[in-house]
């Protein structure tokens, strides 16, 4: 321990008193007019006269408390309104998407919000602008600008690219002509007229089935359809006037067709793949799937299909950190295994070229998808009444 002489102690004590007075004056009483030196001697402070200091300290405490409260409130508001990554999922696919994301290695911070479509095929309620992420839907609208009236959307070279205008195709539900393996493929002449053998089945109760036939019959060239007008309505209305389809076609639903398809030979039905995959395997194992017969001279063909899309939305382009987070799920979405799992659950085929179909019929549908030069969706014709 260091030993100090008495003069040294006095000097150090005096320096300490000076420093204390300076500290108190500068930090506590710089704005306090009640401050004065202690009568006990120069350089000392009368602590009994620090009433103003107490008031000033209370004011500083209130300011500090307000700042802390503001920080807490600001943090709470930011947590409530900060940009959030979400999956915005169309209601029919919400359960599937919860299952897919739960079994993946994706960040669980991505919230799932479901929505319903309005009659125009658009989300019934928009998301707040602070949300960003992917919209999972079978109604993209991204190809509407390419489509003529009568066709909802047309996507050139979609099966080759796997995406269109930033929208990523995940799974495909193509329309195919189904028949028994022992029956011949449907010819173009039989598809257009009642001449020839065999029975064409159509579920007259399903207006979309009639719309699909209308579009196929009116397609002039690959991907070329006539403009909207009376021709579309007249063709749709005339489908059931002659004998192109089975008798009583207007009274048939899908279940009625499946119960008769094996009883008539030859016979065919134009249907989406998912309709067939709902049937037991012992029945469909003896069936084949073909694309709709194209006209003579066509060297390319399209495919009518329903598509499940992953469509990015939000202001991700303006925020680098947001763009990075938006990019996190992209490898997973583009993965062949992911798309195969989605397609298997839906009874569709994966959009990925390396996806694995789950049975021979799905394999035939996949070959038609991979070799198509454009994909289109039919629009429900207006003015056709209740077929």
Image (cartoon, rainbow, N blue to C red):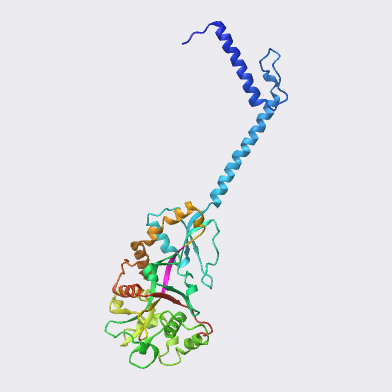
Direction from residue 335 to residue 2 in the image, left or right: right
Residue ranking furthest to the top: 6
Residue 106 position (above or below residue 154): above
Which residue is rendered at x = 58% and y = 9% of the image?
Answer: 10
Q: Is residue 306 magenta?
A: yes
Q: Can residue 260 be seen in this view?
A: no
Residue ranking furthest to the left: 182
Residue 353 position (above or below residue 132): below
Give x and y (percent) for residue 175. 38, 77
Give the quarter of the image for residue 272: bottom left
Residue 84 position (above or below residue 48): below
Give x and y (percent) for residue 302. 39, 77
Give x and y (percent) for residue 66. 63, 39
Which residue is rendered at x = 37% and y = 56% of the image?
Answer: 104
Q: Can residue 58 be seen in this view?
A: yes
Direction from residue 312 to residue 65 in the image, left or right: right
Q: Does the magenta stretch include residue 197?
A: no
Residue ranking furthest to the right: 33
Give x and y (percent) for residue 149. 50, 79
Give the quarter of the image for residue 208: bottom left
Which residue is rendered at x = 37% and y = 54% of the image?
Answer: 105
Direction from residue 17 to residue 166 in the image, left or right: left
Residue 341 position (above or below residue 85): below
Type of secondary structure dominating the magenta stretch: strand
Number of disc labels: 0
Which region of the structure is painted magenta?
A: 305-311
């Amino acid at each position: 321990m260091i030993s100090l002489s008495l003069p040294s102690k006095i000097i150090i004590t005096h320096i300490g008193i000076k420093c204390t007075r300076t500290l108190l004056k500068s930090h506590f009483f710089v704005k306090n007019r009640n401050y004065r030196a202690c009568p006990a001697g120069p350089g000392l402070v009368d602590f009994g006269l620090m009433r103003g200091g107490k008031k000033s300290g209370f004011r500083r405490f209130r300011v500090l408390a307000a700042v802390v409260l503001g920080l807490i409130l600001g943090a709470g508001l930011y947590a409530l309104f900060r940009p959030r990554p979400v999956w915005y999922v169309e209601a029919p696919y919400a359960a599937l998407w919860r299952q897919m994301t739960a079994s993946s290695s994706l960040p669980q911070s991505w919230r799932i919000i479901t929505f319903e479509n309005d009659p125009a095929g658009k989300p019934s309620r928009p998301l707040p602008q602070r949300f960003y992420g992917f919209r999972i839907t079978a109604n993209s609208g991204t190809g509407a600008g390419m489509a003529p009236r009568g066709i909802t959307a047309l996507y050139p070279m979609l099966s080759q690219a796997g995406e269109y205008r930033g929208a990523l195709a995940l799974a495909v539900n193509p329309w195919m002509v189904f028949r028994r393996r022992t029956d011949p493929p449907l010819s173009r002449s039989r598809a257009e007229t009642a001449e020839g053998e065999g029975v064409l089945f159509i579920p007259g109760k399903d207006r979309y089935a009639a719309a699909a036939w209308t579009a196929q019959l009116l397609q002039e060239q690959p991907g070329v359809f006539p403009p909207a007008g009376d021709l579309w309505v007249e063709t749709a209305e005339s489908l059931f006037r002659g004998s192109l389809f089975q008798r009583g076609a207007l009274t048939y639903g899908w279940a009625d067709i499946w119960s008769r398809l094996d009883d008539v030979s030859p016979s065919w039905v134009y249907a989406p793949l998912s309709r067939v995959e709902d049937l037991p395997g012992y029945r469909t194992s003896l069936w084949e799937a073909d694309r709709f017969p194209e006209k003579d001279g066509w060297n390319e063909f399209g495919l009518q299909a329903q598509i499940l899309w992953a469509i990015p939305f939000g202001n991700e382009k303006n925020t680098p950190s947001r763009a990075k987070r938006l990019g996190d799920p992209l490898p997973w979405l583009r993965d062949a295994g992911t798309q195969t799992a989605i397609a298997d659950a839906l009874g569709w085929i994966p959009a990925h070229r390396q996806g694995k179909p789950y049975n021979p019929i799905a394999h035939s549908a996949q070959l038609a998808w991979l070799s198509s030069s454009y994909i289109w969706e039919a629009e429900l014709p207006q003015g056709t009444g209740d077929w």
